[in-house]
Structure formats: C-alpha cells, structure tokens
Amino acid sequence: MRVSYENKLGSIIFLMVSCLLIVFPLVYEDRNLLIIFTQIFIFAIFAMSYDILLGFTGIISFGHAMFFGIGAYSMSIFMKRFEPEMLYVFLALIVGVFLSAIVSYVVGLLTLRLKTHYYAMLTLALANLFYVGAEKWRSLTEGADGFTFRIPDFLRERVNFYLITLVLMVLVYFALKLFIQSPFGKVLVAIKENEQRTESLGFNILYYKIIASIIAGILASIAGALYAISLRFVNTSVFSIDITLDALLMTIIGGVGTIIGAVIGSGVIEFSHYWLTSLVKLHWIFERWIIFFGILYILTVMFFPKGIVGALTALKRKARHEKKHDQSDKMTG
Amino acid sequence: MELFFSLLINGLATGMLIFLLAVGLTLIFGLMSVLNFAHGGLFAWGAYGGVWIYSLTESYMIGVAGAIITGVILGFITEKLIIKPVYGDHVQQILITLGYMLVLGELIKVVFGPNQIAVSPPELLRGSIEIGELLIIKYRAFIIITGIFIFLIVNYILKNTKIGLIVRAGVIDKEMIQALGVNINKVFLYVFMTGAALAALSGMLLAPYAGVIHADMGMEYAILAFVVVVIGGMGNVTGSLLAAALVGISGAFMAYYVPELSLATNMLLMVIVLVFRPKGLFTIRG
Amino acid sequence: MMSTLLKLQQVETYIEEFHILQGISFEARKGEVTVLLGRNGAGKTTTLRTIMGLNKASKGQIFFGNEEIQTLQPYEIANKGMGYVPEDQGIFGELTVEENIKVAMKKDDSQSLERLEWILQIFPDLKKFWQKQSGLLSGGQKQMLSIARAYVKNCELLLIDEPSKGLAPIVVEKVMESIQEMKDKTTIILVEQNFMMASRIGDYFYIVDEGRTVYDGKMQELIGNKELREKHLGIA
C-alpha cells in the first residue's frame, strides 16, 4: 500500500517538475542551462532503459553502450549521407531501433542463459567488439576522430530540441511505469527476486529476459540518436565503457528499480559534471570530477543499495513512524 | 617460414601477458566466485608504478620489482576495502569492481597526469638476436621466458605446497575447506594479492613492448584475460596458459592476415565456449 | 551420567527468508552416538550446518564444551575439534585420496599420524587407493574418505550427515560398522533416515520436526515403542 503511495507521489512530483520545465525556456533564457537540461533528459531516457535491466529484471549488463552507440551512429550516418531533413531523422530512428532490437535479441538469445558473472563479462566484451569495430570500419565511422554532420533546422533550434527530449523523457517514464505494473512487468520483478522460483512457477525466464533486454536496447538506441543530434558529432566514444558506466552511475546513485531514480541520477550527475568542471579554475582535480562519482558509486553500492530514492523513502518512512508513535503516545498519555 | 615464426613469437609474447593477468582472475574467481572487473586497473597501476620507479632509478629490474610491490600493496588495499565488504553478494561484487575500475583509472590520471608516457626497453633487452635465419626480438623473448617462468612457479606452489593444496581444494569446494579448519578469507587475501602482483607485472612487461602507457590500457587486456579465463576454465591455471597462448597466437595471425576480424574471432571463441562448454575447453570434469 | 560435550538451546536459523530451524534444543554426551531423526525437510541437515557455522543461528546458543560457538566462523569451530561429514560427502574430486586427507591435517605430528594410521586400518580401501583421484572412488569409498578426513584432524566431535544415503545395503553395513568402531575414540552426532542402522549404533535420539526438537529418549525406548515411531517418523 505504502509503496504504491510513494510510487504515485514520485510520479506526481515528476509530472509537476516536468510541467515547470516546459515553461522554463519561455521565462528564462540561458543557452548553457538549456543544453544541460537537454543532456539530462537524454541520459534520463538512457538510464531508465538501464533500470529495466538492472533494477527490475536483475540483469547486470556491462554492454549497454552497444545500443546507445547503434542509435548514435544510425542517426549520424543518415544525417551525413542523406539530407538533414526530419524524414531522415525518423528513418534513422527507425533503423537504429530496428538494429538494436535485432542485436539485443541475438545477444540475449546467446547470453541470457548464462550466470550473472559470465553475462556481465560477455556483454562487456561484446560492447568492446562494437567499439573496436567502429574504430576499424573507418570508411563508415571515421574512427576515433569521428565526423560532424548537419541536422534539420527545426532541431537546430535549441528550444525545440529541448522540448522534444523533455516530452520524450516524460513519455518514456510513464510508459515504463505502466509496463512495470503490467502482468509482464510483475514477472520481471519476480525474476529479479527469485529466478528459480519464478521458473518453477512455469514462466519461461529466457523469454521474459529477452523481451526486457530488447525494450532496454530500443530505448537506449533512441537515447543514443538524440545524443548524436545534440552534439551534431559522433565518434567511437559512444560505444565506450564510459557510456555504460554513465548508465550505471546514474541508476545506482539515483536509486535502482524505481525509474524515477534514473531520472534523478541523470540530473545529479549531469549537473555535477557541469558544476565541478567549472571549478577547474580553482583546482585541477575537478577535471577528474568523475572520480568523486566513482567513489560515491562504490559507497552507494556498499551502504545504500537503493540509492538516493531509497534513502529518501527510508527517511520519510522513519519520520512517519515517529509521528505515529508520537500520536499513540499522546493517546495513551 | 620466417614470417610464421615471427608471428608465432609475437603471439606467444602477447599470450604470456594475458596469461599473467588471467592467473589472478581465474584463481580469485575459482576460490571466491569473485569476478574482478578491476583487474585491468591493477594492470595499469602496475605499469605506471613500475615505469615511474624505472625512470627514477633507471634500472629496469628495480622497476619490475616496483611494479610487483605496487600490485601487492594495491591488492591488499583492494581486497580489504572493496572486495571484502561485499563477500557473498555477487551482484554487489560485480557492480562494485567495475566502479572501482573507473576510480583506479581516474586515480592514475590524477597521480601521473592524463597523458601517455613513452617507455623503452632497457639497453640489455633492445634489438634482436639471430638464430640461423630467424630474427627474434629480444624483449619478446624476455616476455615469453618470464611468463613461462611464472607459470612454473605458480604450478609448483599449487602442486607441492600446503597452501597450494588448500587453494586447489578451495577452488573445488570452499565451504568444505572451511569446515576442515581453514580460514579461507586469509587464503583468499594472499591469492588476491598474488593475482594483483602478477597483473601489475604484466602491465610493467607490456609497457616497453607497447612503447607507451596510458590510463585506460587495462580494459583491452582485461577483456582478453576474461576470454582466456573462460576458455581455460575458471580456477584452472594450466588451462589459462594454454588458452592464453591460443588467444595470443590466433590474435597475431588474424591481425596479420584478416585484421578486421582479429578481435571478433577471440570473442566468438568465448561465446562458443560459454554457450557450449561453460566450464572451459580444457576441463576433464564433467 | 557422562558429561555434555555439545548443547543447543532454542537455536533458530533462517535460510534466506525461510525460517528453517524454529527451536532446536539437544545435548550430545561425550562418548555417545546421538542420532537426529525426522522426516525429510525437518531441519536435520540445517541443524548440523548451524552447529558447524555454515549457516548462522539467528537466535539461541550453541555450547561446545563450555564455550559458546554460535558466533564463530566455520574454520574456528572446526579448529576447536569438530569434524563434519556433509550429506554430499564434500570430497575434493580432483585431488587424490592422500591430498584430501593431507589438506585436513594441520601438521604431521605424531598424534595426527597415529590417528591416520588407525583410521586407515578401519578403511583399508583408502590405503589401497591412496594415490587415486578421489572423484573416481565408489560411493562407499567416498563416504569413508569423508569420515576419515573429518577424523584425522584432532576431532572430539564428529557430525555425520546421512552416511547411508545412496549406498548399497552391503556398503551401508560396512560404513555403519566402522562408525561403531569409532565410538570409542570420539563422540558422534548422526543424522540418519535409515532407522535400522540408526537404532543399531545410536545411544540416544532426538526427533526433529518442522525445525523443532519434539521428542527425545534412549534409543532402546524407541526400538521398543512402535507407536512412537509411527507418530513421529511414519515408520513401523
């Protein structure tokens, strides 16, 4: 009961903040902030897609950058080879989604039977394969140097792109919420909690895991495509382990298995990134800002496995508990 | 023929570097089911620590010793601070070691700066030796000899000492070995430190071979070491040696003849082994 | 009355979220064979594992001699003089018989060697296959190896979990005979489904049901009381 209440509260706050964010560019003009927010929205989509795997199905993938990269390269190559028109943006999105779905299906079929360790290891290796592949296939990707491209005028308008990514993030958020509460989503959670028991109840674990990873892959691909548009540039770094690490940091620090945690994590990390790198003038160590998050991440995994969201709900529960106690004290006293 | 031998030696040298990384990984996993995703970070730290001492003392051998000491110290800290608090929880372990890998890499950039550092072999190991028609690059031969030497030592310890016996038994059944009065955590700490030292040694050996070192050098080799550990069978040191030679040599030949596919073949090998023989290619156990 | 070597007081154990032991209390007296009886899934194996520290007791106390041991690590408990023969025998299959024994022996002192010599007399097969890979032994030989291994390190109390499981009747006979012989040298707690066997070598019994010790008495009493057997064990 309480969980669903907190769930709803999270969604309501999320919706309210999102509404505020829609009017934000109208009242406050700051190009930098607009760009940061756009990044937050994009990575929120990416992190939410990762939460489906880690937080709801209990799959630890170290290769999520694969799908992000596929989306980013699909978009970039379309924009470069064809005209920078909206039609091609849509086409590129579809192609990226399609490729990601196929890759996640094949990879899932091969690897999702494996134990956690092996799966994590293999996905790490496969993502690395894509990374090296992108480096070697220079005729298409121009390797680590990458290439720039033009995008449709409509998307060049920062406010437009800001709004598009914001709306997409909100849509993905609610779609995933619905998905998780559906019978299908409940099976995923059951798998996370006890795989063997779920299997013995007659569910085909592999099927559910594959569908979950296809959905995660598709969303990651969309995030990758948006990311490429936002930079108007792509290089092999979209396939790098750093991208997967971003998803990990965001979901874990924000709070695994909550969806909203991924959004919060994205906000925290992107804002801190911006803020900490601006401190480089004070001390060079801030150029290595990610180290703080690496340490924070390790501490979170050790001591707050539920991240910021988990810590907040625990605090609130405690407060409510105390309140109740006070009341009952009063009644008896 | 000349080309064949040259590729063979090239591949063997790479294979030995991977093997040194894999020894630690495979024993750590075998003993505690901990898959250390930060092993590549220890490798990179070994290279930086060793190269730093090498450049200070201008003695390569002291540099190598420095790398090993770096590995031992870092292994101790890592086990106590990172691995031990999450014993028994696989999900936490996997997540934590990857995050730790990130921290180790960033720490290198903080301590030694973000740029590549050039390294060259010591005077004695520069150039090549001629055996008949064959031209063998000295440093590669040095790596191969070191690798085999380390294998022999590790193998001797495993087969002929009490601690080796305990490690072998622990790999098979870590619960039973505790019920027989062995403090497995202490044994594991030693194994982890040894593994870290060998990873560091591997990094140091690679440094003059590759010519430069950089903070992210660990990842590629760590992935190859994963491949080797899987093919060789978790906990199987001899299997790792064979697999490392296989991966190194096939990598060298593929890189020469079909460079586009060189990494893909190794990966494919791992996928096939994992899907069809998850206990490795060289295990007899059913 | 002989002195108590091991004593459990209201021990409770969880495995994951399952409340397996809900109140186990019993004593094992020095020099006796104490048998834990009960249906499958009653919690007998978990009781042994909890004594050994392999599962942690969440409540209650376990005394070994005068010492509380429920918070100790398995290796510490083992080193206090407890030997464990698990249900699956826990043989290191890739090691030889010799290595299996050597890994358990703290040192090659005269006492341990004496014990080794004695146990090899009881299990001559082990001597015969001294250098053989233990995974290739027969089921009965593995059981003997497991018992011998637990015994050679200074072992005051031996916990043996279902030694008859999966063995041919004639082999069971042999294993039980050797346990009988070991009675003079060490105290034994035996978990056994095979009532015939248990009744022959047991001195005292406890019945475990749904994680609780529900009945206890002298073995003689149970042998003579058909009603009791039917009620608690479902056997006549």
Image (cartoon, helix red, strand yellow):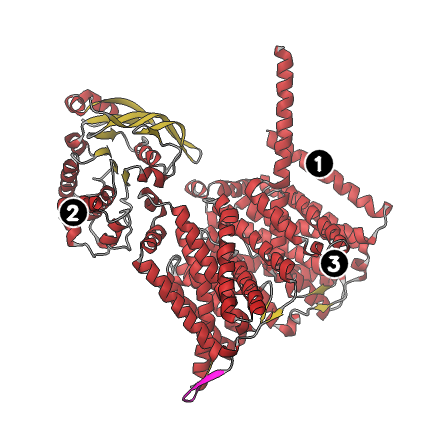
Q: Amino acid at mark 1?
A: Ile
Residues indicated by labels 2 and 1 sit on the same polypeptide chain: no
Q: CA distance from mark 1 to mark 3?
A: 28 Å
Majority secondary structure of magenta residues = strand
Q: In the picture provided, is C182 more to the left or to the right than B2?
A: left
The chain holding disc 2 is C
Using the image as rendered, state which of residue B146 and residue A65 is in the foreground: B146
Q: Amino acid at mark 2?
A: Glu
How far across and how far down the image is residue C177, in percent? 13, 38
Q: Is residue A230 magenta?
A: no
Q: Quadrant of residue C6?
A: top left
Element type at mark 2:
helix
Res C117 label: 2
Q: Is residue C176 above or below residue A128?
A: above
Viewport quadrant of the N terminus of chain C:
top left
Residue corresponding to mark 3: A230
Local crowd size for mark 3, using a 10 Å CA cut-off: few (<14), some (14–19), many (≥20):
many
Q: Is residue A97 visible?
A: no
How far across and how far down the image is residue C140, in percent? 19, 46
Res A12 label: 1
Element type at mark 3:
helix
How far across and how far down the image is residue A255, in percent? 61, 42
Local crowd size for mark 1, using a 10 Å CA cut-off: few (<14), some (14–19), many (≥20):
few
Q: In the picture provided, is B219 more to the left or to the right than B176?
A: right
Q: Residue at x 66, y 55 (%)?
A: A222
Element type at mark 1:
helix
Local crowd size for mark 2, using a 10 Å CA cut-off: few (<14), some (14–19), many (≥20):
some
Q: Is residue B129 magenta?
A: yes
Q: CA distance from mark 3 to mark 2?
A: 78 Å
The segment highlighted magenta reads B128-135
